[in-house]
Image (cartoon, rainbow, N blue to C red):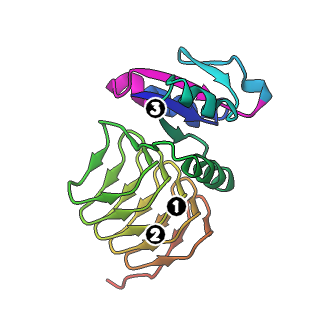
Amino acid sequence: MKLAIIGSALTGGAIQIVDICLEDGITNELRIYDDDPRALCANILGVPVVGTTDQVHRDFSNKLIDTVVVAVGSINSRFMLFQNMNRENYPIVNIISTKAIISSSVKMGKGNVILPNVYIGPNVAIGDNNYFTTASVINHDSLIGSHCYFSTTVSVAGRVQIGSRVRLDTSSSVSADAIIEDEAHLLPGKNYGPTRLP
């Protein structure tokens, strides 16, 4: 696999994906593309930023890359980059740390990034292009849309429905049976959803 990592060279997303790939040996070659001019020629854990997203098409045609994944955490940018890559019919892959725990019954789309120490329980369904950061927990029978960002130590209880383009900030939590609408923003440390009586 020759992987193109799209965006976030200077803001953290790319370094996390590079780290997974290097630790787990899940790719043969890595290249980073970023439209921020400050990122050009940067080096992320030994992996170069080789150009902007405009260069992806040429490098794909020249067989320098054969798969892509979006590294950006910002919801709108993540959505737009995924749409652009999908429109070009590039193979968009899931990047999943071997240190994550994923139930064998999980159903998942494409372009999802799952960092170490994430837990995703049985009968969870996940759409496309979501980013699960370290130590996030998604419990059983939950339904996750697409283009969402789960920050560090987010906790989602069982039978939760989360829409698309949702941001869940650090240590936010969602109670069992809650429904989170599209484009919601869950603030750090806050609980959302029904309160269960003892």
Q: Viewed as shown, does residue 80 lie left or right of 31? A: right
Q: Earlier in the sequence, mark 1 or mark 3?
A: 3
Which sits earlier in the primary sequence, circle 2 or circle 3? 3
Three-letter amino acid code of the residue under disc 1: Ser
Give yes or no for contact between labels 1 and 2 (Cβ–Cβ under 8 Å). yes
What are the residue bounds of the magenta stretch? Answer: 20-36
Residue that carries the numbered disc 3 in the rendered image: 66
On the picture, is 91 further left or further right than 168? left
Marks 1, 3: nearer the viewer: 3
Pick the residue in front: 148 or 152: 148
Q: Nearer the viewer, residue 25 or 52?
A: 52
Residue visible at 40% across and 46% down?
A: 135
Q: Which residue is mark 1?
A: 172
Q: Quadrant of residue 184?
A: bottom right
Which mark is on residue 101? none
The residue pinned by badge 2 equals: 174
Residue 141 among those drawn in magenta: no
Q: Examine the image and state in which quarter residue 166 appears.
A: bottom right
Q: CA distance from mark 1 to mark 3?
A: 36 Å
Tell me the kind of residue under disc 2.
Val
